[in-house]
Image (cartoon, rainbow, N blue to C red):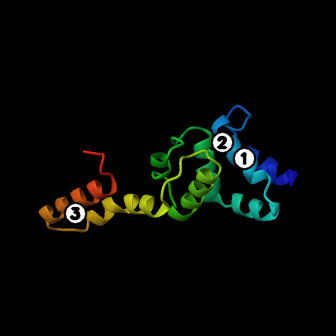
Amino acid sequence: MKIAAQATAELLDNGAGHVRLELVPFFDEVRSVPRPKATLTWAGKPHVQQILRALARSEVPLTHEGLSTLSPCRPVAHVRDLLMHTGVLPHRDRHLLLFERRLPEWLDTIEDVEHCQLLNRFATRHLHPGRP
């Protein structure tokens, strides 16, 4: 278990030898899992390491919007779920987040400009009624 905690601490190092303060609840959860070998396998994947290091070093904002700039999508979604589960990020619907992430590229495939604008307005207002 100590090896998993040490490896996770290294990934979440803020650049000054400490786990980034905002990520401590996430760190505590990850290092206390009942199967540390699975954690080591997961955390050993290069794309997971890149995501965690970017968050730990504040290269990417520790927000839903910040996470949405990262890829690949699946590991980001898993990290996001863990961050929400540990209270580091506020809970948001994961399907809605995925839709928001994919909406711009989907709209880019629509050739009719008016149709595209209509769909964009509908999606934006329907998903976020309080936004202009």
Q: Which residue is mark 1?
A: 27
* Relative depth, front residue between 13 and 95: 95
Q: What kind of element bears circle 2? A: helix
Residue 96, above or below 61: below
Residue 68, above or below 34: above
Looking at the image, do the residues carrying marks 3 and 1 touch, with CB atoms under 8 Å apart? no
Mark identifier at residue 117: none
Mark identifier at residue 23: 2
Label count reads 3
Give the Cα separation between the discs numbered 3 and 1: 41 Å
- Residue 73 location (% of width, % of height): 50, 62
* Image position of 63 (left or right of 119): right
Type of amino acid under label 1:
Phe
Residue occupying image coordinates x 12% and y 62%: 114
Residue occupying image coordinates x 80% and y 49%: 5
Residue occupying image coordinates x 77% and y 60%: 40
